[in-house]
Image (cartoon, rainbow, N blue to C red):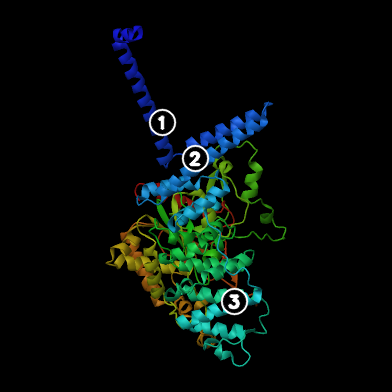
């Protein structure tokens, strides 16, 4: 009774206390719910889990320094806490995966970036995540540089119990199936040459399933399998047949070849090229994912050989649903190989010349010093000189001259020909040899650009064998039209463009731009109007004497159309150059020309001559430099301290930073 009277007497006080407690409890619950929701739903921050991991590790390390009375109980408690934290991490990863499948591109990309950085999950949880990842998310994860490889499923090896003879027979049966579907004569020709039957080799393509016997010239699987892959590579390079391997369920068979010969660089290159050709068809993504190729491509993007890393990155870029640009068989994405946070402010397009290639033309030049004891050979190279002055105190106005300095130049040349000592000390030299300086040097010095390499096949003679089903693009007009359409597929023209060309590549670019300038197609027109710079490495604007053969030599050598069009004073080259000069008068663009001055050895007779002479290599517009190099070496800088490289770097820095462009 006394208690009741006390409560009634202080009723208002108890009411206030009760309301305060309820309010505090509600606020505390709301706060905890928000914290939980923030941790699980927010796909942008992993600091909560990282801090939890840090605290646990600190607690465990501190507890290891203390002598516990009950170690068994403590270990049980630590295991329980660790398992609880692993569960929370897995829940968080699952939530990120759910957001990664969202239709909203912004949140999807954010979640994928965070999911790729989760490297503290257990193997079991990673395996669960890998089984829940869909093909599109797998491709997006594969394009991120530091994604945990455990997020990709292991390939299902269906032919692991095959011995080498059965595997070769399976490859032969698959090629026969490909031939029966496509009737591609090149496949039939290869089968008839690589495999010999007991009775009649012509039955190889006539539904004959008799016993297989390898040709006497091909004895082992190490010899026949690369040839089979070469045949498939040529087959899928034709757009009409690029889906045949997947349609005929050949991807698991190729996966078995990859598993057995993953250390064979030639086989790996061919497999990667086959997949890059197939990647143009996004409808093949499911087949490539279920056969385990997405994880393999992700691993190959880190390969030290650019003939593997570049095609692998190209294949993943083509399969990525968030990537609108498509890179055909003639185009290679040299930078960025992975998704990056840099804004691409310009496109830099490299195109080689006659008999060149993306993985050959743009490699670093080797410095073969002669043993003659002349004064010029006793001088230190720029790189050696820089290494010697690193520890010296020099004036700030001290300058160093680049290597490959021109012997002659036009009056409007801007350089730079030298570099301040303070800047050169900060320049970090890379001593490793590069097989593609646009990919390794430019990509490092300029992050905010996209670098594209164009590849096309050429020949010197019409005697070279051609595929009967492929109309080879021989003339400049045909080749220019073909490459222009493929460049439009990768969204070229939406940003400022700089062209870097060598030899015949410069003629192709001039023809593309001249046609774009006269075109009514707005997309193609933008390729011309957005061109801000062109660099010519020994381009024969007026032809070359080396391509001018007499009638007797022409009958014997039967030069290709490409060689015939490169003849000196060719009417076609004259027309292209006149149209190019007219275009440059109306559209402002930087033009830089490097021309060789040294002869090149072209025959076993040690006959030397200059392929592109100065009067033919000078376009008559822009900056003109005569470089003491031959035709092959002029597009291959000796190092980053070469004027051939530094002038291009300076041009790109000027274009990407100038508001006038």
Depth order, front residue of 475/357? 357
Q: Residue at x 63, y 90 (%)?
A: 198
Residue holding disc 2: 88
Which of the two discs, 3 and 2, labels the residue nearer the N terminus?
2
Report the Cα–Cα distance between label 3 and label 2: 51 Å
Image vertical order of residue 556 relative to residue 90, above or below? below
Rendering coords of residue 647 (x, y %):
49, 53
Q: Using the image, tell me which numbered label, if any, was put on residue 32.
A: 1
Label 2: which secondary element: helix
Image vertical order of residue 214 relative to residue 393, above or below? below
Q: Is residue 526 left or right of residue 158?
A: left
The answer to whether residue 607 shows anywhere in this view is: no
Residue holding disc 3: 227
Which of the two discs, 1 and 2, labels the residue nearer the N terminus?
1
Q: Quadrant of residue 53?
A: top right
Rendering coords of residue 557 (x, y %):
54, 84
Depth order, front residue of 34/631? 34
Label 3: which secondary element: helix
Circles 3 and 2 in contact, beta carbons < 8 Å: no
Q: Residues within 10 Å of mark 1 (few under 14, many from 20)?
A: few
Q: Quadrant of residue 282?
A: bottom left
Report the Cα–Cα distance between label 1 and label 3: 65 Å
Judged by depth in the image, the label closer to the viewer, 3 or 2, is 2
Extreme-front residue of the structure: 1
Q: Quadrant of residue 10?
A: top left
């Amino acid at each position: 009774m006394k208690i009741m009277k006390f409560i009634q007497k202080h009723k208002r006080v108890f009411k206030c206390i009760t309301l305060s407690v309820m309010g505090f409890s509600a606020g505390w619950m709301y706060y905890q719910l928000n914290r939980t929701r923030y941790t699980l739903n927010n796909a942008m921050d992993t600091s909560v889990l990282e801090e939890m991991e840090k605290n646990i590790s600190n607690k465990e390390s501190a507890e290891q320094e203390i002598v516990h009375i009950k170690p068994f109980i403590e270990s049980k408690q630590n295991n329980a806490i660790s398992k609880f934290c692993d569960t929370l991490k897995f829940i968080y990863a699952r939530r990120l995966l759910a957001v990664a499948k969202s239709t909203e591109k912004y949140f999807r990309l954010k979640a994928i970036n965070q999911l790729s950085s989760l490297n503290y999950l257990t193997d079991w949880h990673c395996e669960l995540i890998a089984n829940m990842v869909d093909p599109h998310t797998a491709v997006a994860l594969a394009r991120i540089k530091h994604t945990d490889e455990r997020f990709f499923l292991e390939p299902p090896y269906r032919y692991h119990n095959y011995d080498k003879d059965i595997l070769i027979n399976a490859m032969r049966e698959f090629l026969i199936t490909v031939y029966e579907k496509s009737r591609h004569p090149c496949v039939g020709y290869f089968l008839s040459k690589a495999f010999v039957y007991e009775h009649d080799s012509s039955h190889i393509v006539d539904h004959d399933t008799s016993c297989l016997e390898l040709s006497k010239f091909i004895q082992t699987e190490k010899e026949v399998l690369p040839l089979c892959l070469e045949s498939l590579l040529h087959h899928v390079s034709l757009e009409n047949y690029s889906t045949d391997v997947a349609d005929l369920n050949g991807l698991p068979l190729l996966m078995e070849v990859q598993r057995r010969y993953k250390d064979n660089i030639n086989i790996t290159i061919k497999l990667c090229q086959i997949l890059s050709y197939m990647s143009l068809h996004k409808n093949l993504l499911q087949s490539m994912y279920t056969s385990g190729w997405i994880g393999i491509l992700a691993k190959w993007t880190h390969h030290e050989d650019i003939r593997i890393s570049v095609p692998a990155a190209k294949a993943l870029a083509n399969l990525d649903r968030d990537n609108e640009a498509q890179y055909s068989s003639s185009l290679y994405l040299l930078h960025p190989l992975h998704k990056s946070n840099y804004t691409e402010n310009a496109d830099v397009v490299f195109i080689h010349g006659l008999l060149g290639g993306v993985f050959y033309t743009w490699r670093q030049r080797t410095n073969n010093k002669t043993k003659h004891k002349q004064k010029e050979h006793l001088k230190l190279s720029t790189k050696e000189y820089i290494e010697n002055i690193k520890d010296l105190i020099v004036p700030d106005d001290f300058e160093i001259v680049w290597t490959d300095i021109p012997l002659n130049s036009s009056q409007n040349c801007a350089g730079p020909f030298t570099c301040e000592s303070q800047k050169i000390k900060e320049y970090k030299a890379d001593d490793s040899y590069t097989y593609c300086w646009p990919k390794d040097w430019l990509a490092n010095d300029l992050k905010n650009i996209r670098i594209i390499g164009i590849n096309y096949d050429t020949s010197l003679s019409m005697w070279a064998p051609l595929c009967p089903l492929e109309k080879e693009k021989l003339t400049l007009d045909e080749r220019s039209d073909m490459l222009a359409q493929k460049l439009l597929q990768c969204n070229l023209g939406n940003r400022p463009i700089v062209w870097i060309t060598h030899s015949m590549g410069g003629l192709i670019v001039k023809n593309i731009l001249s046609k774009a300038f006269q075109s009514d197609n707005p997309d193609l027109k933008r390729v011309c109007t957005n061109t801000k710079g062109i660099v010519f490495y020994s381009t024969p604007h007026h032809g070359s004497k080396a391509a001018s053969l007499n009638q007797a030599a022409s009958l014997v050598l039967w030069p290709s159309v490409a060689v015939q069009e490169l003849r000196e004073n060719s009417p076609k080259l004259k027309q292209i150059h006149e149209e190019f000069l007219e275009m440059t008068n109306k559209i402002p663009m930087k033009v830089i020309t490097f021309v060789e001055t040294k002869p090149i050895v072209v025959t076993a007779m040690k006959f030397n001559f200059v392929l592109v002479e100065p009067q033919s290599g000078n376009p008559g517009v822009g900056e003109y430099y005569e470089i003491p190099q031959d035709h092959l070496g002029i597009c291959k800088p000796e190092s980053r301290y070469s004027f051939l490289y530094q002038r291009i770097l300076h041009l790109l820095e000027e274009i990407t930073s100038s508001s006038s462009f």
